Amino acid sequence: MKRNKYLLLISSVAVFLLLCWAAVAENYLKEWRRIQATGRGEEGRIAVQLRQVVNNNLGVADRCVSCHVTMGPGEQGVRGAAVLMPHKPAVHDPAEYGCTVCHGGQGQATEKADAHGRVHFWPEPMLAKEHTYAGCGTCHATLRVPSQAQMKSAALAFERLDCYACHRLDGKGGTVRPDKGGMEGTDLSRAGMTGWDQGWHAKHEAKSAAAGAGPWKTAFRPVSSEDQALLAVFLNTRVAAPKLVAAKSVFHSSGCLGCHKVSGVGGDDGPDLSKAGYKDPGQVSFEHVPGKGEMKDWLAEHFRAPASVVVGSQMPPAPLEDSEIQQLTFYTLSLRRKELREVYLPKDRIRAVKFREREFATDGETLYGAFCAGCHGREGLGRRLPGLASFPSIANPDFLAIAPEALLKATIEQGRPGRRMPGWKREDGLRGEELSAVVGYLRSMSPAAVEADGRPPRWVSADWRSGKRIFESSCTGCHGKDGRGGEGPALNNKVLLAAATDTYLVETIRRGRRGTAMKSFLESSPVRPVLTAGDIESVVAWLRTLEGGKK
Amino acid sequence: MTPAYPQKDALRAFVEHLKSVPQRIRETAFRTGPPTTDRTRSTFVFGNVFLHLHAVRTHRWSLRWSTTAGLGIMSVSAFLITLVTGVLLMFYYKPYPEAAYQSIKDIHFVVPTGRLIRNIHRWAANVMVVAVLLHMARAFYTAAYRRPREYNWLIGIGLLVVTLGLSFTGYLLPWDQLAYWAITIGANIAQSPREVTDALGITDYFDPGGLQRLILLGSDQVGAEALIRFYLLHVMLLPLALAALMGVHFWRIRKDGGMVRPAEADAILARQRHEETYPVFTEAPAKTYQLAAIVRGRTSNVGRGPENTVPSMPHLFYAELGVLMVTALACLALALVSDAPLKELANPSVPENPAKAPWYFLGLQEMVSFSAFMGGMGIPMIVLIGLGLIPYLDRETEGTGQWFGGPGGWPLVRLSAVIGLCVPVVLESFAIRFGWLREWFPKIPQLIVTAVNPGTLLTLAYVLFSIWCIKRYQSVRAGALGLFTCFLCGFIVLTIIGTHFRGPNWMFYWSPSDWPKH
């Protein structure tokens, strides 16, 4: 019976020892304690304690400052371990805003792996260093960002006109040169946020005229109105995050909005991207994704080959260079759009959400790039992809030369019901003047002049019965039985038939479309018979019967 | 009253009294003097509100490790540990969605020793479930449920149910994905009578399943209402119920004559040599046992002398405290090695796949995958009722107090274990390999699937085997031995299948590492 006594003794001693160990681990072995113990402030050792940044309006309680001590409120000049160093100068003081709002990660955590969010079961790992600026997207939505090409030419204009001579921008320029050229002018890095003087050109001219010598005389020349417009585009998008804006311009050239929504604007074919940057790496498959299971690898691979990453994806792969893929990834990571309290809602978000200002520039080129380029291609030449219905070449000169204005407009406004082309005249789509801008840009994609059509929209009066016979022998191979579509586009589409004039249809069959499988039916071909003008008209007459109601 | 000192010495008396305060506190606390002799220890035990649940003397048979393996005390110890750690956690826990999750994060990362306390709480809860189950098995295999302990066996079943309830309600409180979807599964099991009412087409008029789920969740989905409900159950109602039942359980142990022991216990003890022997009394009895002699009735100690007993203090208390500390040691060691899980914040729009109930319900979930009603309600009810009936059906006396005592004995238990393990393995293998009725005949009426599925067939096989045992050994105890062993083995097999071999969409996988990566 003594063994009960020994059982009690041994187990009690063991419990006591384990508790001692737990006490030591709790009080001495925590990483943040060891880091803080190395810290020396102006008055010697700093207090070793848990530190945090709390901001209830932003919903943060970030204990990151338990290790990154100097980034916390009221801490200065603490030396010691490397992580104690202060934050780089930033617009948003981490002591007020906390850390996770911009950087992601797990603010409540007090251990490195957990805090940086690179653990199981934390959906929001910290943004990698090269993607730090994606954190801006948590609150901000840069407005009026143009397409990639426009962005490039606007940036080049700023450089070409040597604005850097006097103005500082994102850490470049605005210094007096050894040759005494240039001067320290206004910093324009945040012109897009703070606004800029619209009358700058006249003022510059006046000052230049008044100056006798110096940079005002030597560095300034009057700027043409086209260049002024480019500079305006450039300045509007200066928000101290040039790489993020550049990435956004790639987004606005890749047509993603054609199928995806961002903050309530865009198509419905794909998932809403407003919070795509918060996608949980724990919830996606990395089976076919190279790399270390990080979201950026997943996104990049997903742009290159959507269907291999997401089973059954109908998204066309992005025909982009790797650098552009990286930029798209970067921008997607920035799509966070956290719900914010009024006090912290930035002006650009208010303008975007409350005043419905556009995040994309509203010129035709950008609109085409943002909404259409994904399917129709940046050059408008259409895309044929295995496993997907082919996307028509809408910049084909033969098409644009004969396509009536009403057809283009109706197609964009109403789309092609039953196919992937959505109609864009709706609340979350394009507005009136934007629709015409896209039509205008489409026209500009072809050098061919638009041919005037003096005839009424419906003038064909041939016999549809023979047209049906001809259609069945000559057209169904591509356009499908009853014009339902196949390799070629569907012709029984209501919107198409309603908006297409007879001239347009007849001319399309007559001339064909160069560069596509649709050849002219007036030319002889080994694979199909030549049609006479009368034949073509009867085919058109039969097509008209597909509108329904007449047959 | 006459003052002890003349009035002029009142001041001195005050000082004297002041000086003697510590001594007086000791004296008044122990009332009968410090517990240094067996007699004063005895009076100390029955004079103490916490200790008087113990008999003042304990039979030596009860102190053998093989008698109980300390499992009952281990269950109580685990409960006490969860009680203490649970109260500590309550200081920081906020029972509201999201806030709950954040508070667990705070407990984990910021509250001093919070992580350790939470880990201990979690491990002690698991230890408690295991200990209670093993305790029940011990009581069964030593036939301790027999007269006069039948009723205490019923109380024990109540304690098992409340223990599982406590563990289950605690599962939701972290409000993470694990919790949310486990409780969603649990709530759907509560709703499973709908499987039958739907099949009969009477759900619109009579919907006990929906009502059960509504009562459990307080809403039509797992939300703030469910959380506050589970919290209240977890920290108040169920612990109170458990404490009350425990009180009855312990009191009945005394009233039913202490630990069960075989009739020949004294003879066996006498044959064994002991390193030390205890005299029955270390001093001449101060009381006679005449009073006990005139007590009538069936109370167990009537007419028995104190032979082969030792004073509970200290011998029983060494054993009890020893088990308490061993339990604490186990929980503490596990808590230091393994963190309690905390997944992502609960998100109703992202279902966990597979969503699994707590481990002790995974056997049920496995059966639920064939028929929600039979797996989740029907068979558990049958098992609970069967358990409750055991002491009233088995009125034999052979083998009481002996491990695997009774007709058949260990060979029967061994045979039952083989059958109990093989039948569910074969049934499950068949169902996993070839599917079940629904896969073969998609249009089959649900009632047939409810009635004929691996769970019911398993139950049927066990019952048939048990009937065979009764006939073969001409003993109800043999049937009980067979049935209990079978169900225990079935529970183990199904729990392992549900825990280890079931992956996304409840498909079979040889190992969790084979699961598709989402």
Image (spheres, helix red, strand yellow):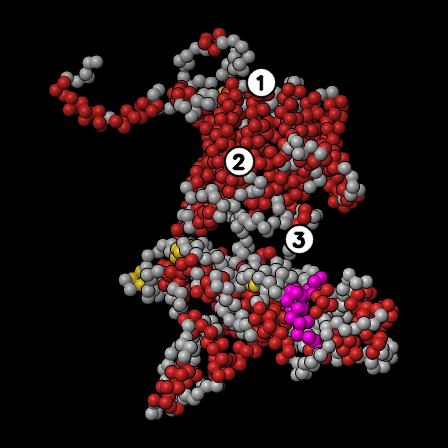
Q: Mark 1 points at which residue?
A: B148
- Looking at the picture, how far across and down is residue B232, in whole percent? 48, 36
Q: Name the residue under label 2.
A: B166
Q: Please determine if labels 1 and 3 lie on a single subunit.
A: yes
- Looking at the picture, how far across and down is residue A69, in whole percent? 38, 61
The answer to whether residue B42 is above or below residue A492 is above
Residue B68 drawn in magenta: no
Q: Mark 1 lies on which chain?
A: B
**Quadrant in which residue A71 is drawn:** bottom left
Q: Mark 2 lies on which chain?
A: B
Tell me the magenta residue range.
Answer: A402-423
Residue drawn at (61%, 42%) of the image? B185
Residue type marked 3: Trp
Q: Are marks 3 and 2 in contact (CB under 8 Å)?
A: no
At label 1, counting other C-alpha atoms closer than 10 Å, the crowd grade (few under 14, some 14-19, many 20 or more) is some
Residues B68 and A334: in front is A334
Residue type marked 1: Pro
Q: Mark 3 points at which residue?
A: B515
Q: Is mark 3 on a helix, strand or loop?
A: loop
The answer to whether residue A431 is above or below residue B40 is below
